[in-house]
Amino acid sequence: MKLIDEASITVEAGNGGHGCVSFRREKYIPRGGPDGGDGGDGGSVYLKADKSINTLADFRHTRRFHAGRGQDGSGRNRTGSKGEDLRISLPPGTVVRDVDTGELIGDLLRDGQEILVAEGGRHGLGNTRFKSSTNRTPRQSTQGTEGESRTLFLELKLLADVGLLGLPNAGKSTLISRLSAARPRIAEYPFTTLQPHLGVVSLGEHERFVMADVPGLIEGAAEGAGLGTRFLKHLSRTRLLLHLVDVAPFDPASEPVAAVRTIEDELSRHGAGLYDRERWLVLNKIDLLPESRREAHCEAIVERIGRDLPVYRISAATGEGTETLKYDIWKFLQR
């Protein structure tokens, strides 16, 4: 399913039921007195995280949601039933904001977590409530109040332990398909990844972590260029970034050191702490270099970059070096 990571919806809680004006009328019981019951409360709207959902695609067409209205009260002191609450299921990782005020309402992180976004109206009071020693036949009641109505902006940020970043064609999709069961499109031209992908990397029965592959970044991504702009946010929750670099690019513009500088600049401009996040440098496609030149070539790149980052040399295509990388990631996440 195509990942939809933004949506706007309108939620309306149910109105409260009105109170009833009624008097007891039974044979042989004169002046029976008031017996109008209260109305029921309106239903509220909740958002709930559901791990079986991984996209906001359901909200492309259905954008308005209503909770149940409270039933009006009736005679014989019968209280109206409460309106049915509405629970809207969303994928974990969804951030919820109020469109009108910009207020951050909540962040759904855990499966089963719920947040109240629109409270139902309060019930009205029946005339029984107004009976007193000086008012034996009250004819007043109150109406139920209206439920809350809000327009919400939903933004899905993928929940992953490790995020892959790099220029287009750096080999991110190949790496995630090598380490996990994810199968993104892979080709020899840029921008084959058009949507984020999640892959679960397993080391054992209970040893696994989640890796995210986002579309490749280009210069100016933080200002809106290319495909990576809207997907940088998906890296904001990760604990570790793997910065993939093509050590043998066909395009001179993708020269390894310049590629690293470009990505670092975009991380710095984007903010959200991405530049200071734990980041490892992964020199990919070493299989394209003659074996006698690999060591010297990679050392020269690292020296010119001048960053004190952990460095790995791999070939995502052949699998060389990927097992070591995988186990070192697991050790880091455990720490």
Image (cartoon, helix red, strand yellow):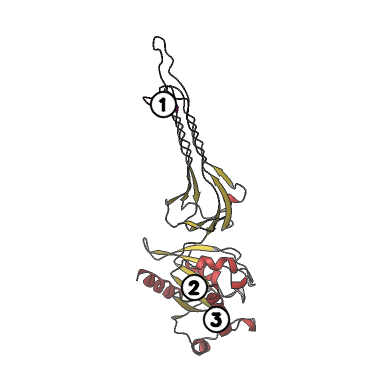
Q: Is residue 168 at all visible to an observer of this figure? A: no
Q: Which residue is under mark 1?
A: 128
Q: Main secondary structure of the magenta part?
A: loop
In the displayed structure, would residue 234 be above or below residue 81?
below
User: Residue flagged by tag 3: what amino acid is it?
Assistant: Val
The quadrant in which the N terminus is found is bottom right
Q: Which residue is under mark 2?
A: 274
**Picture residue at 61% right of the left edge, 51% below the top:** 60
In reply to whether residue 134 is colored magenta, the answer given is yes
User: Residue flagged by tag 2: what amino acid is it?
Assistant: Leu
Q: Secondary structure at mark 2?
A: loop
Q: Quadrant of residue 246?
A: bottom right
Write the start and end of the magenta stretch as one range. Answer: 125-138
- For the residue carrying disc 2, how many other residues have a C-alpha within 10 Å: few (<14), some (14-19), or many (20+)? many
In the displayed structure, would residue 308 be above or below residue 21?
below
Q: Position of residue 165 (x, y in %)?
A: 53, 73
Mark number, residue 260: 3
247 or 13: nearer the viewer: 13
Q: Earlier in the sequence, mark 3 or mark 1?
A: 1
Q: Position of residue 208 (x, y in %)?
A: 40, 64
**Picture residue at 52% right of the left edge, 59% below the top:** 156
Q: Earlier in the sequence, mark 2 or mark 3?
A: 3
Q: Earlier in the sequence, mark 1 or mark 2?
A: 1
Q: Position of residue 108 (x, y in %)?
A: 46, 56
Left or right of 165 on screen, residue 113: left
